[in-house]
Amino acid sequence: MPTEILMPALSPTMEEGTLAKWLVKEGDTVSSGDLLAEIETDKATMEFEAVDEGTIGKILVEEGSEGVKVNTAIAVLLEEGESAEDIDTSGSDAKPAPKPETETEDTSEEKSAGEGSGKGAAASDTKAPAAPKDADGDRIFASPLARRIAADKGLDLSQIKGSGPHGRIVKADVEGAKADAAPVKSDTAPAAAPQAAASTPAGPSADAVTAMYQGREHEEVKLDGMRKTIAARLTEAKQTIPHFYLRRDIKLDALLAFRSQLNKQLEGRGVKLSVNDFIIKASALALQAVPDANAVWAGDKVLKLKPSDVAVAVAIEGGLFTPVLKDADMKSLSALSAEMKDLATRARDRKLSPEEYQGGSFAISNLGMFGIDNFDAVINPPHGGILAVGAGVKKPVVGEDGELTVATVMSVTLSVDHRVIDGALGAQLLEQIVQNLENPMVMLA
């Protein structure tokens, strides 16, 4: 029996994707593990492997098709001894590829029916009923035309024996069946369509906004999967997460001097530590020092994590990734630096696997290198918090002896999910981060 190859869910949150490229064609023989296609998710382009062996009988979704839902049939795999005539794709939601010149039995039958019905093309455009199932829940294989005729005559296809390939029911079988043969019965009335949930008030519609700018030169930029996902997730975050914000200034002079000393010693190994590497380490250690803040919101409960898995926002063309550095508290500064550079490079090339950018309990977003003094970051659910990092700038400060002096000061803002972390707990976490960065040698103890 032909096997449908379904659009895979390449990440836990994936609902649809773009079939970027087919790596096989109709008629190719494939084995388990062979690459079938390249699929673009909202975050990356990933290769899709075959799990069964057989022959590609039909490609149902064209290369470049966008918005293909997960579990939609994208191709049909034939087993040994099967042919294209055995394929029945009428029940599929997939977008069909261009039809080949040679027609199968089903299309020939439909054309004949259309020409003989007096309705011409309209008859052949009528959608066939969905593929039926027998009493055991197994799919009954029948041609689209056979299903339509059976529906019109009130016939139960499970009571009809098919004469087509592998017992498939064809036009002749249902035309020769008795009209009183086991009509289809329904014990229940169709369920009423659920009432649409009241939606959150939105801004002007797309058409209304476009109309405002008629006559003004502009360019329409089509949203890709990443931008759609960012828009949906951050809108959800701001509407559903009760954010509150904690702000601190951090004196960086001790850290900058320590970093310079370490980089000179690590120069022979090709290692160059950044301020961001210290921020990652400081945050990871703070989560261990304040374990109640190392938590995520899980709908009806809070999950407290043992390891410090810290996500770091990486800007790429058209969006951003938040790759996760797992067990960051256990790793040396040089190891964190090397891992972060690798993750950032592959993020920009969209080569990260889902497990590399999902998870974590805490995130860091650093815009200091762009000259931003301070900002408030939006929490990336289900994280409990995110640290927004600004630039280190020289400012006049009052020293411990009461005299005015100059110091390099970095402003940070901790955005906190109040469902997970209360104000005092958030303040403890931020205080620990500050202490780690202002006394950097402590992080090596």
Image: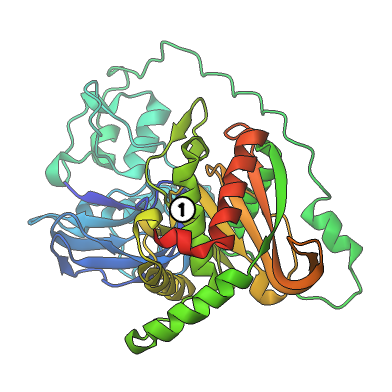
Relative vertical location of residue 296 with respect to residue 55 in this rendering, above or below: above
Residue occupying the far top of the picture = 187
> Which three-letter amino acid code belongs to the residue tagged 1?
Ala
Residue with the most extreme bottom position: 268
Q: Position of residue 59 (x, y in %)?
A: 32, 63
> Is 207 in front, or is 237?
237
Q: Is residue 140 above or below residue 112?
A: above
Residue 191 horizontal side relative to residue 223, left or right: left
Residue 388 seen in the figure: yes
Which of 121/207 is in front?
Answer: 207
Give the residue displayed 42% in from the left and 51% down from the top: 309
Q: Is residue 265 above or below residue 195?
A: below
Residue at position x 75%, y 64% from top? 399
Kindly tell me whether residue 221 is visible in this rendering. Answer: no
Residue 359: x and y in percent read 43, 49
Q: Position of residue 99 (x, y in %)?
A: 38, 65
**Residue 381 quadrant:** top right
Label 1's element? Answer: helix
Q: Name the one closer to the observer, 111 or 18.
A: 18
The residue that disc 1 covers is 284
Q: Residue at x 42, y 53 (%)?
A: 94
Picture quadrant where residue 83 is located: bottom left
For the residue pair 23 and 350, the one nearer the viewer reads as 350
Give the percent coordinates (x, y) of residue 346. 41, 73
Point 20% across, 50% down: residue: 2
Furthest toward the front, the residue is 401
From the viewer's perspective, tell me whether residue 13 is left or right of residue 83.
Answer: right
Looking at the rendering, in which quadrant would you find the C terminus? bottom left
- Dot 1: few (<14), some (14–19), or many (≥20) neighbours within 10 Å? many
